[in-house]
Amino acid sequence: MKTTATSPATSSEAGRARGTLLAADRIVTLGHGRKHARALLIRGSRVVWVGDDPEQAPPHGEEVDLSGCVIGPAFVDAHVHLTPTGLSLTGLDLSEVESGAELLQAVATFAGAHTGRVVWGHGFDPHGFPDTLPTPDDLAQVADGRSVYLSQVDGHTSLVDRRTLAAAPLARAEGVERDATGQPTGRLRREANHIVRRWSVGAMDPAELDTARREAVRHAASLGIGSVHEMAGPDVMGLGDLDAWLEGSWPIEVVPYWAGLDIETALSRDLRQVGGDLFLDGSLGSHTAALATPYADRPGSTGALEFDDDTLSAWFLEAARAGVQTAVHAIGDEALRQAVRCWMQVARQLHADGLHDAVRRGRHRLEHAELLTTELLDDIADLGLVVSAQPAYEIRWGTPGGLYETRLGRERAATTNPFRALADRGIGLAFGSDANVTPMDPWGTVWAAENRRYEEHAVSRLEAVSMSTLGGRHAARQERYVGVVRAGMRDDLAVLEGDPYRAEDPRQARCVATIVHGRAAHGELPLPSAREPARR
């Protein structure tokens, strides 16, 4: 990368005010008009010119030669849990653990090297473990007197120690797994898992949480991610965590959703979106996703819905009348049927009140939508709902003999995450990671959507890129002012080494720089740093 000055004042604020010209091998605009260019000029937080010949650019202060690089829109991760992601990055990451014995050893090693009040770990996946999980007494023995909270990869089941079982308010909680003698095994689901998660967060050192938050956004920026949709909620990290994201200063854009039935909590914080991980059901891994027919490996169970139709419809109606966007976590086909059924009822009621297109204008979201049946697609399109999906799930769980086949059987597993059918219906698709369930990895997301085991569900490279960038802008109702690279739009950009848009395998792409609101969120560019106020 080479920077050249076109006037003596280019390193001053006056030079910045004239703008910075970025010249690269190629600029991928994702626009409907000019699709490719070689240079763009940014001033403050806006792109003011895009063209093929840098010599034809309007007057500017500095020029950056990005030979060997391609510039495109910054990525949007449309579903993340930032603080847990940061805790995995800075703490106990269990994603590589392959047995119960390894899990216990990882806890022991971490506890011996860290002084926090809670041993918080995430990412273990017991599907395929050759042995049993550690007992509450096992965990207590290696934790050196500290509480242990270990979240399974899907976040819907946890494993805790004896001390936590005794100290957390679990006396009447549903979801405490017990053995044949009636003793707790340490595994918690549904209500019990939510209670202990909240209790554990409250016991953690605030400085540890702050460090995790800063590491999460730094890591996102290093990957070319300029915006994330943070799925906060009372059953995720709590209201204090939401307020920390709202009140903090971050190098990337954080769009928060609050997963509570109380819309006033969001409105009092000037949010126009609620839900996100408002759970209509659980997860396939924990056998708590709501299915229309029983689990293949647990014939007596179909999971469970968390709300009745009346409660969900009333919440949808309240939000729609307030002009607030909703998002709901719905994984199983029965949960998705409930969401669509309730939205249809609300649409009819609003139509009768003279609000004929209120639901479509709201652009309400379905998060995950893994087991989406064909008969729901037309209604989802008619309602204008957006699907926020995680292609990496297929890499993790969609392999032969993997979790999807184990839980659903081969026939149903072949229908999961039907991206092609959604795109062909014109249904908005926004891709994300659900970090820390799967890592933030935008090019891995693109590759996963393009390389599906069942080819009929795959989308093309450029479609997947669009769903990972413009899809998130559409889902957040931002596409009027940020997304495609053209004059007048906000300058949220990713500078990428080589050309991952055309590479056979884009997963090794390296992000050279990330620009958000005209600031350098990652990389070295002659722009205000992420800590400086954006100049408009």
Image (cartoon, rainbow, N blue to C red):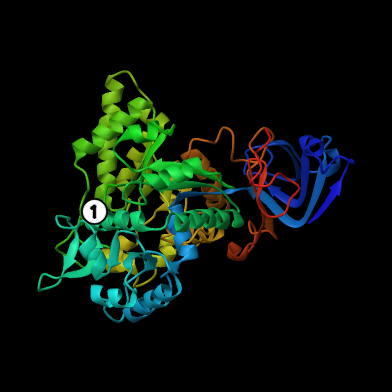
Q: Which residue is mark 1?
A: 290
**Image x and y of residue 343, in percent:** 29, 35
**Image x and y of residue 308, in percent:** 19, 42
Residue drawn 37% across the image and 74% down it: 107
**Image x and y of residue 361, in percent:** 42, 29
**Image x and y of residue 211, in percent:** 51, 57
Q: Quadrant of residue 518?
A: top right
Residue drawn 64% across the image and 35% down it: 489
Figure quadrant of the N terminus: bottom right
Can residue 425 be seen?
Answer: no
Q: Nearer the viewer, residue 16 or 489?
A: 16
Residue drawn 50% across the image and 58% down it: 440
Q: In the rendered image of this protein, does residue 492 appear above or below residue 69?
A: above
Q: In the rendered image of this protein, does residue 498 appear above or below residue 399?
A: above
Mark 1, secondary structure of its residue:
loop
Q: In the rendered image of this protein, does residue 199 appear above or below residue 136?
A: above
Q: Amino acid at mark 1?
A: Ala
Q: Nearer the viewer, residue 376 or 87?
A: 87
